Amino acid sequence: MSHQSGDWRATLDDVDAALIDGYQSGFPVEERPFRAVGDALGIDEDEALERVERLRNAGILRRFGAVLNPPVIGSSTLAAVRAPADRFDEVADVINGYRQVNHNYERDHEWNMWFVVTAGSRTTRDRILEEIEERTGCEVLVLPMLTDYYIDLEFPVVNADQFARESLASVSVDGGAETAAQTPETDASATRISEDAATDLSAFDCELLLAIQDGFPLSLTPYRDVAATLEAPVDDVLEAIDRLQADGCLKRIGCIVNHVVTGFDANCMVVWDVPDEELDERGERAGELPYVTLCYHRPRRPEQGWSYNLFTMIHGRDQEAVDAKIDELAAEYLPVSHERLYSAATLKQTGARYDELVGQ
């Protein structure tokens, strides 16, 4: 499984590359954001907007807008089932039928279907999990995030890197993990996660999050358009978005890249059995590594035969390169029992979806 340049790059120029790799986050929160982007790229605002539209239509960008942070806004969990081969599609259809399921992947493992359920409340989340168990007849492995060491799917893609952040990682070859730890992209301090909504959202905040969960309108005035749908002043929307970012309800605002289309489809979730007393130390150390895109603590479920408590994710274009990094991780940072769960197919992938954020 290896992808280097690929057809997706054939129509891209340097401005497209700067737009894709430079605006995955940090998109201006102002009335005419594409004017500011155009000024930075040496083009006018109409062309900046047209380029984002074209990149989205080509599938290189999944959407344009905000990335919501489910553990802060509501209640979210990773879950898995062992779907029988002869009922695999049927089980996937049941799970994917829930709007609150925003990711679902087939993985090479006994637990072969992994999905994320996100809801406005823990009660709703747990009801959906119970329904999935009843409707599919499959036992559900429920693995909520307990500690976040490092989570960021923002990385350069217009390159020949074999794994995510290869070009960034090369900067720290001489200094090793210590140098990597000093870069702002790799702050891996432990953050505890509640399974219940951790933030008190105002009624306006709730309306705004529901309005932008699928992305912003592609127009020269996206924030004004959102404000119009909410019948609110645009300044209120701009202020709220800034505040929701500061509070952690929004992870970032920008162009959301489709990593599979851009060749990063050798994606491996590695699960580790780390002694509990070493978890924070080893989790923070692993999370500091530039090639680790996700690193978090989830509960063991010994009664279901699940003994792993640390999850890392490495995204790559080349499985051999990803395996080499996992070997390095196991030899130098996590010398414990582990398993590699490569994604075999994407069954569903959307942003986090909420029907309502109050009264659930």
Image (tube, helix red, strand yellow):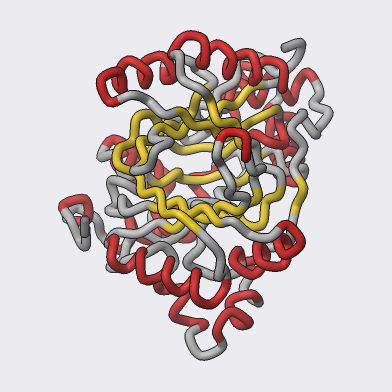
Residue 317 pos. (x, y %): 29, 59
Please give the count of numbered marks on the rendered protein.
0
Q: Quadrant of residue 196?
A: top right
Q: Please tell me whether residue 313 is drawn above or below residue 60 in the rendered image.
A: below
From this viewpoint, is residue 225 visible?
Answer: no
Residue 179 pos. (x, y %): 60, 82
* Residue placed most toward the observer, 5 or 58: 5
Q: Quadrant of residue 157?
A: bottom left
Viewport quadrant of the C terminus: top right
Give me the residue at 65% from left, 26% from top. 209
Q: Does residue 135 appear to the left or right of 317 in the view shown?
A: right
* Residue placed most toward the observer, 119 or 251: 119
Give me the residue at 58% from left, 49% from top. 308
Residue 90 pos. (x, y %): 32, 15
Give me the residue at 75% from left, 15% from top. 358
Residue 185 pos. (x, y %): 59, 65
Q: Does residue 193 appear to the left or right of 20 in the view shown?
A: right
From this viewpoint, is residue 180 visible?
Answer: yes
Q: Please tell me whether residue 166 is drawn above or below residue 234 in the rendered image.
A: below
Q: Quadrant of residue 350?
A: top left
Give me the residue at 39% from left, 38% from top. 110
* Residue placed most toward the observer, 75 or 273: 273
Viewport quadrant of the N terminus: bottom left
Q: Does residue 201 appear to the left or right of 141 in the view shown?
A: right
